[in-house]
Each structure stands twice: as structure tokens, then as C-alpha cells.
Image (tube, rainbow, N blue to C red):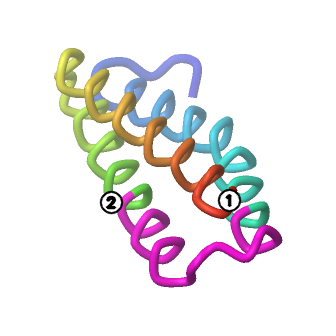
Amino acid sequence: LARQSDWRARANAAQANIFEWFPFFIGAFVIAHQLGAPQVRVDILAFLYIILRIMYILTYVAGVANVRSVVWTLAFLVNIALLFVGWR
């Protein structure tokens, strides 16, 4: 994989980024459940996060850096919201 170039190298980097962020998503999801967050809110935030991450992969592979950064930031904010949705 280290010898790949163009979109193949970007696809590998996007995959690595997903693996780096997956534990944070799972942690936020579990904490939201443990804090008794409303299930509908948890479901919506989790779904939105997954959609944003799919968009992130697509923009990363396409090489659209500015849009990719915006999508990454939105996914990050949704994950933070998921983390705190159960706090009262």
C-alpha cells in the first residue's frame, strides 16, 4: 500500500483515518447509552455521523481537501454531541 499513488493512496489514508476515529465514536455511543440519553437522539446522531464519515471517504478519495475538512469538522462536532447528549 505504501507504493500506491493518486486516489488509491488517498483511499488508504481515508481508511486509516476511519480506524483512528472509530474508537472515539464507539466510546461516545456507549457513554450516551450509559447516561440514559434518549434513544431517538442517539440514533439520529449516530446515523448522521456515519453518513458524514461516508461523505468524508468520498471527498478524501476525490481529492477535494476543503470540502473534506468541512465534513471532518461536522463529523467531529456530531461525535461530541453524541458524547454529551446524555448529560443532564
**What residue is shown at x 60% (from left), y 34% (from top)?**
16
Q: Amino acid at mark 1?
A: Arg
Q: Residue at (27%, 47%) from the top-left corner?
A: 55
Question: Few, some or many C-alpha atoms within 10 Å of disc 1 (few <14, some 14-19, many ≥20)?
Answer: few
- At a point 77% along the width and 66% down the height, the residue shown is 30
- Mark 2, secondary structure of its residue: helix
In this rendering, the answer to whether 52 lies above or below 50 is above
Amino acid carrying mark 2 in the image = Ile
Work out whether residue 38 or residue 9 is closer to the camera in this orientation and state it: 38
* Residue closest to the far bottom: 39
Would residue 70 appear left or right of 32 to someone viewing this image? left
The stretch of residues the image draws in magenta is 32-48
* Foreground tag (1 vs 2): 1
Element type at mark 1: loop
Say which label, 1 or 2, has the lower sequence index. Answer: 2
- Counting every numbered tag in the picture gives 2
**Quadrant housing the C terminus:** bottom right
In the image, is 25 to the left or to the right of 3? right
Give the label on residue 38, or none: none
Query: Which x, y percent locates residue 38?
Result: 57, 79
- Farthest residue toward the right? 34
Magenta segment's dominant SS is helix
Q: Position of residue 24 (x, y in %)?
A: 70, 44
4 and 35: which is toward the camera: 35
Q: Nearer the viewer, residue 53 or 82?
A: 82
Q: Which residue bears the numbered disc 1? A: 88
Q: CA distance from mark 1 to mark 2?
A: 27 Å
Query: Residue 51: which disc?
Result: 2
